[in-house]
Image (cartoon, helix red, strand yellow):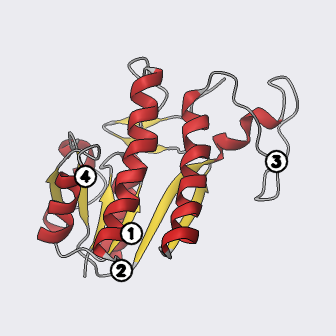
């Protein structure tokens, strides 16, 4: 059975390409799929693309059923961009994650992989301090108005609650800065 990847952005497209290499035909689910940029990373005839809104649970359930999905890799997120208002960031990153988990619970899916970020560690050290080596034991910290990091940390806790309370098989991974070609340009990490 195929995997649904929420978010057809840079991370989602590269995840899809890897799944294609492994012999799968994944399905990308995005409110506004960047088809041309995705095509630079993965052959479009080897993936499904479903236009849908992560904030609409019925939309997500419909896609999961129609595509006969048994696992989700949740990469969709509102990144810290000029149009990322606090309200929109919280809505997409937390309620979107909640909908993914609830859909997986309702349909008894095999697994959910939640893609978080190493930004959850940013509040643990000062902006001027030397950047230490960060591993899973490194403390997280308050993010000081940085809604992306706060929503990623909150989503991780919600993921763990779904695992404990609902028996959902979940994994949360924290990606580092993402570099690579995307949409005809070099994608660079966000600086502070």
From the viewer's perspective, is 87 left or right of 171? left
Q: Quadrant of residue 143?
A: top right
User: Is residue 77 something one can see in this rendering?
Assistant: no
> Would you name the residue on which mark 1 appears?
18
Residue lying at the far top in this picture: please name it.
82
Q: Nearer the viewer, mark 4 or mark 1?
A: 4
Q: Which residue is mark 4?
A: 57
128 versus 9 height, above or below = above
Please provide percent x and percent y for residue 60.
22, 56
The Cα–Cα distance between marks 4 and 1, rounded to whole angstroms, is 27 Å
CB within 8 Å, label 3 to label 2: no
The earlier-in-sequence mark between 2 and 4 is 2
Q: Position of residue 61 (x, y in %)?
A: 21, 61
Whether the residues at callouts 3 and 1 have beta carbons within 8 Å, the answer is no
Measured Cα–Cα span from mark 3 to mark 2: 35 Å
Kindly report which numbered mark, 3 or 2, lies closer to the viewer in this rendering. 3
102 relative position to 130: left or right: left
Which one is in front, 3 or 101? Answer: 101
* The disc label shown at residue 22, or none: 2
- Separation of residues labelled 2 and 1 (CA atoms): 6 Å
Label 4: which secondary element:
helix
Question: Cβ–Cβ below 8 Å for labels 3 and 4?
Answer: no
Q: Are marks 2 and 1 in contact (CB under 8 Å)?
A: yes
Mark 3: give few (<14), some (14-19) or many (20+) Cα within 10 Å.
few
Q: Which label sits in the foreground, 3 or 1? A: 3
What residue is at 17 percent from the left and 61 percent from the top?
63
Compared with residue 50, is residue 77 higher up or lower down, i.e. above or below? above
Disc 3 from disc 4: Cα separation: 33 Å
Q: Secondary structure at mark 3?
A: loop
């Amino acid at each position: 059975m195929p995997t649904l990847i929420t978010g057809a952005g840079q991370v989602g497209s590269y995840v899809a390409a890897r799944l294609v290499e492994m012999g799968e035909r994944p399905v990308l689910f995005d409110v506004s799929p960047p088809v041309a940029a995705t095509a630079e990373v993965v052959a479009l005839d080897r993936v499904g693309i479903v236009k849908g809104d992560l904030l609409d649970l019925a939309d997500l359930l419909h896609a999961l059923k129609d595509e006969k999905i048994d696992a989700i890799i949740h990469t969709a997120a509102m990144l810290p961009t000029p149009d990322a208002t606090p309200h929109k960031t919280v809505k997409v990153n937390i309620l979107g994650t909640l909908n993914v988990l609830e859909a997986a619970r309702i349909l008894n899916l095999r697994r959910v992989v939640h893609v978080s970020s190493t930004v959850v560690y940013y509040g643990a050290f000062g902006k001027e301090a030397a950047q230490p080596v960060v591993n899973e034991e490194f403390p997280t910290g308050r993010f000081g108005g940085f809604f992306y990091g706060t929503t990623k940390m909150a989503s991780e806790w919600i993921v763990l609650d779904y695992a404990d309370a609902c028996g959902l098989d979940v994994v949360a991974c924290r990606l580092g800065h993402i570099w690579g070609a995307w949409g005809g340009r070099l994608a660079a990490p966000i600086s502070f």
